[in-house]
Amino acid sequence: MIVNLLDRPKKRKNQRVLADPVNNRLRLQTIIRLRWIAVLGQFAALSFVAFGLGFYVPIGACLTVIALSAWLNVFLAVWYPTRHRLSIRYATALLAYDILQLAALLFLTGGMDNPFTMLMVAPVTVSAATLPLRNTIALGIMALLSAAFLVVAHEPLPWYPGIELELPLIYKLGSFAALCVSTTFIAFYAWRLTKEGRQMSAALTATDIVLAREQKLHALDGLAAAAAHELGTPLSTIVLVTKELERSFKPDDPLIEDIALLKQQALRCREILQKLTRHPGEEDPMYARVSVRVMLEEAAEPYFSDAIAINVQAGPADGSKPASHRLAEIERRPGIIYGLGNIIENATEFAKSKVDVTAKWSNSGLIVTIADDGPGFRAEIMDSIGEPYVTTRPAEMSDGLLDEDSTGLGLGFFIAKTLLERSGATVSLANRSGGETGAVVTVSWPRTFILNQ
């Protein structure tokens, strides 16, 4: 909150507020720089045609149109701070001005006959990368309507003195069609790339948040172990003192019940601390290593139920060398446990009766397979599962309305897959074969992942 207040630009006297703190994405400085490039390019092209080639150009009118953009840039640079961000409404208005300014300049210099007509694509592309889709569509329609007007109405194309160049109508229509196609394709391409970039950024942020939360929970185990170690001695002293007091009082003494209660509660506290020490945290080096089976059981424990049976099996792979037959141990990482737990949770939601969690290790590495007996992955989303905002849950209808809670956001498996891949794993998906139905998720690590191999 303090940082936001310090970074907020101070409003000058009589200054109107243009920024939208929620939806603003385009900096004013960016659009000013792009317009300066356009102004310099327009001025250079006009000077070359008029003075370099000697063609007739209505230079006064053209310079007036170019000067309007220059003065608008000066006004915006002086009136608003450099770091100011435009709201969607005003960014759309400025890009609409750029389209109309370019259309006016093209009207004076040949209309659709002018090869620079393709520059109408630029403002629409900027909008596609920074503004919502509906605003981009509106700007695209404005650009194409302006181009359609330039097909039939425009000043002659600058050409050699005494010669008026007029291209055939079929050529103009072809140029207009090319402009329509290029504007639509480039704008859609830019919008799609920007959207996927934002989704990926948001999904990775969610992954970091989940990982940070799991690491905090893991750190609490260390705090609990430290607390158990520190409180163990005073609790033992309390128990010892209460025993002495209990022996020093007669059985019919009214304080004997209070002493017995104090002893009971002290013993209960010691039992609770003993439970905590069964899972010591990072301070205990023994807890940094965990067997593969224990890791799988810990990941699956929250999802055990009477409705769905979760079968956990772990052992050396068939045909592996004797050196691999001992119990495999790995480093205990919260991200791995969370990732496997998320996959197991998804399997239990789709399974009919059981989920098989199997781990096999050998000299080549560790392979964990999570299989259910549900319907399996749908063919149309098989290639896109694991990408952000792609969910395997079908939409459910309730009273004719879409149940949003039943569909999910599609981030769960993405987060799980990202956390597992950060540990060096490879995640693959498939459906059961041989007449059986169900989904199969395979997570494999290289040999170096196993600590005692």
Image: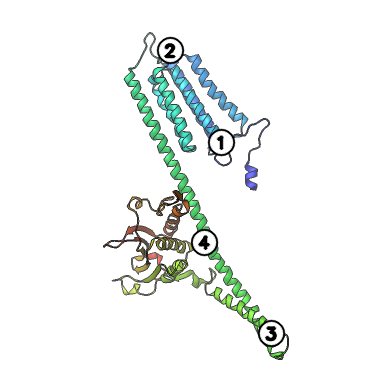
The amino acid at mark 2 is: Tyr
Query: Mark 2–mark 1 contact, CB under 8 Å?
Result: no
The kind of residue tagged 1 is Ser
Q: Is residue 331 visible?
A: no
- Mark 1 and mark 3 residues within 8 Å of each other at the beta carbon: no
Residue farthest to the right, as pictured: 254
The secondary element bearing badge 3 is classed as helix
**Residue 56: which numbered mark, if any?**
2
Please tell me how crowded label 1 is: few (under 14), some (14-19), or many (20+) other residues with Cα within 10 Å.
Answer: many
- Where is mark 1, residue-wise? 87
* Nearest to viewer (mark 4 / mark 3): 3
Between residue 3 and residue 188, name the one nearer to us.
188
Quadrant location of residue 149?
top left
Asked which secondary structure carries label 2, the reply is: loop
In terms of secondary structure, where does tag 1 sit?
A: loop
Q: Residues within 10 Å of mark 4 (few under 14, many from 20)?
A: some
Q: Which residue is mark 4?
A: 214
Going from N to C along the chain, the mark reached first, 3 or 2, is 2
Q: Is residue 25 visible?
A: yes
For badge 3, the amino acid type reads: Glu
Q: Is residue 176 above or below residue 360?
A: above
